[in-house]
Amino acid sequence: MNPIRLIAADEWRLMRRNRVAMLGLVMLLALSVIAALTSIAQRDNSDAIRARFQAQADQAFDGAPARHPHRMVHYGHFVFRPLPALAAFDPGVDAFTGNTIYLEGHRQNSANFGDVRQSSLLVRFGQLTPAFVLQALAPLILIFIGFGIVARERERGTIRQLFAHGVAPRALLFGKALGLGGIAALMLAPGVLALGWLIAFEGAPLAPSLTLLAGYAAYLGIWVLLIVIASSLAAHARTALMALIGIWAFTVILLPRIAPDVALATNPTLTRLETDIAIKEDLRKMGDSHNPDDPYFNAFKQRTLKQYGVEKVEDLPVNYRGLLAVEGEKLTSKLFDDYADRQFAAQKAQSRFTDTVGLLSPAIALRRLSMSAAGTDLEGHRRFLSQAEGYRFAIVQQLNQLQATAITYDDDSNRNKDPEAGRRVRIDPKNWQKVPDFRYQAAATGEKLQAALPGMLTLLGWLVVLGFGMRLAIRRLADAA
Amino acid sequence: MQIIVVDALIVERGGRRVLDNLSLTVKAGEIYALLGGNGAGKSTTLSALLGFLKPVSGSLSVAGVDPASNAEAARHKIAYLPENVALYEHLTARENVEYFLALAGEAHGPEEIEAAFDAAGLQAEARDRPLGGYSKGMRQKVAIALAVVRQVPVLLLDEPTSGLDPRATADFNALIGALKERGTAILMVTHDLLGAADCADRIGFLDNGRIVEEVACDQGYDVMALHRRYGEAVAA
């Protein structure tokens, strides 16, 4: 057996004989298994609930009685975002962004029912998921297991014995890295099993799953190299421990929490309330379809009359009120889209800032990769909002068209005065069934992989830099020998 | 046959000349004791022979291999016992020996290892206990057993009897005597003139990185006179 494998095998033997290290490892593995099981169960449950509620909402809409189409516009519709299978591994922003939207005419509502708003406060401190265990806890346990991996050899004098028996500094450090890497691989094992389960039984896509696996393996590899290098360069094991704990606290805890706040400060976004006020203000400026003197809608009226070659709205072959509703919705939707685009542009700038900070923190880079591959990133939420808004606009305009074509202008104008007209404007409920159901289209595999690429490149960059760090540590070890 | 050859060796550490034209030789089946006070250059000599230090000038040879240019090959010819024997406490004596043999790329059967333990005088019941509870003398026996089983031509000893009681010292001397009989060239550095006089064939007195006097035990010498001359210096 070559010295690298021998040294690695001895590390595993030491690990087996060290009760404290074994306890730490067993605890982490137990946590990983529990996290995987609960996460899969929670996702399945959550997805089933959302699917059930979506079916109920569709049924309620389709089964609504005969009504005026504009009442259906305000009756609205609920849509739910289905949870991707890989959300069981990394739920990402799902708990914070909400997963359902109430769609109605003239309004763009935000997503509701994020877990943090309805569950225990503990959710805010991080859910127990395989992603959380591997991102935050696994490096910490690796540090406690490995901080003395080289330093203790120096402190006890065994390093000189190793060299005296022909072990080269390079073989020593690579052997230590392989030994600690084996322990890291063991930590990854429950996650691998969870991913295998998700692929085999829950329909998780293969390529993003493998990307997740590669990302987490690279992340733990980074920590392994960091620990070996720190333990090799530090004068004492306790110095290595302090340095590594500091690096962990800074890159895993501090930076990922500070970065979004700084990103928000440098690229501020309006709050929901501020956005609502601003939209109301803009809507007021845009015009009022109920005001006969409103210049925009007066111009629209003239245009419409000219288009149909008639003098009065009563002579139009279609219901002018319906046309007004179509035009009004077009205007408000455009405004909503503009605000949403601005909001997303600011959020993208925030994400870019966080990505840049991610160069300093492998944890941030991994989170980006993990959420993108799992389809639970902010882009997935934006995608849901965007599709929901597109769906909202389509069904509202379909109902507005029904108002324009299925109801006469006279009936519509007199529906509150004439009971017969009031009865006639309540159109056949079969029309509601013609409104298509909402089907969320998740990002394609290519898009997910592309979104995960910056995170992966950052992690690979870290591995390259640490490769140079290993070379430095080997040289220093050879000099010190 | 000269196994260890040090010729006009100059070694500097931190800009200070530690070995200054040091020359010495050790034959196969010979024990050479290098005596000197703190900072005289004893441990530096061992480090240079192990290839841990590169000389400024001069030459070194360990069983025909130059450790300055080919440290790994030289280390395969050497068994080294530091002052505080550094072995793994989580391993048993047997596992330690097996581990270091494997690292050195040497394959030896369990019988050879048992024989080496017997030769080193390590009690049978201790061989499968982790080293955590071993005394210094017992650890030395493990290290000696390792040297015995490796059958290397060179044994380097750094203060081997420091901290040992008289009985353990006597056992140790008997052990290296046995290795000498097998033809091993043994270089020991020590403060202990009387101990060295007990087992060494030649004694070299090191001062400021050079040998100031060398005596051969078979030519007869007055230990007490040597003690009067160098006793204070080597005990420093």
Image (cartoon, coloured by chain):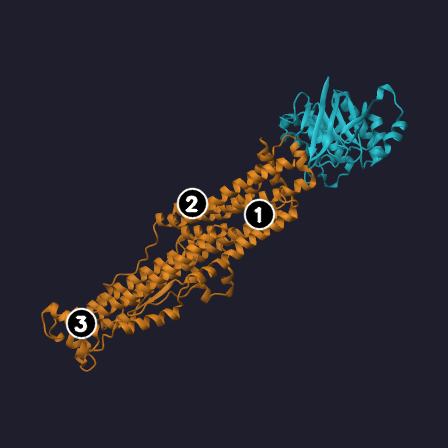
Chain colours: A orange, B cyan
Give the amino acid at mark 1. Leu
Residue mark closest to the camera, 1 vs 2: 1
The residue that label 1 is drawn on is A142
Q: Is residue A219 left or right of residue A201?
A: right
Q: Are marks 1 and 2 on the same chain?
A: yes
Point 35% across, 50% down: residue: A447
How packed mark 1 is, by other alpha carbons closer than 10 Å (few <14, some 14-19, many 20 or more), is many
The residue that label 3 is drawn on is A299
Q: Are marks 3 and 2 on the same chain?
A: yes
SS assignment at label 2: helix
Answer with the quarter of the image where residue A15 lies: top right
Instruction: Give me the C-alpha separation between circle 3 and circle 2.
Output: 58 Å
How packed mark 2 is, by other alpha carbons closer than 10 Å (few <14, some 14-19, many 20 or more), is some
How packed mark 3 is, by other alpha carbons closer than 10 Å (few <14, some 14-19, many 20 or more), is few
Upstream in the sequence, badge 3 or badge 2?
Answer: 2
Instruction: Give me the C-alpha separation between circle 1 and circle 2.
Output: 23 Å
Q: Are marks 1 and 3 on the same chain?
A: yes
Compare residues B52 and B186 and report the one nearer the observer.
B52
Compare residues A164 and A175 and report the one nearer the observer.
A164
Q: Position of residue B81 (x, y in %)?
A: 73, 32
The residue that label 2 is drawn on is A210
Q: Position of residue B138 (x, y in %)?
A: 77, 35
Point 29% across, 74% down: residue: A284
SS assignment at label 3: helix
Q: Position of residue A78 (x, y in %)?
A: 33, 66
Q: How many marks?
A: 3
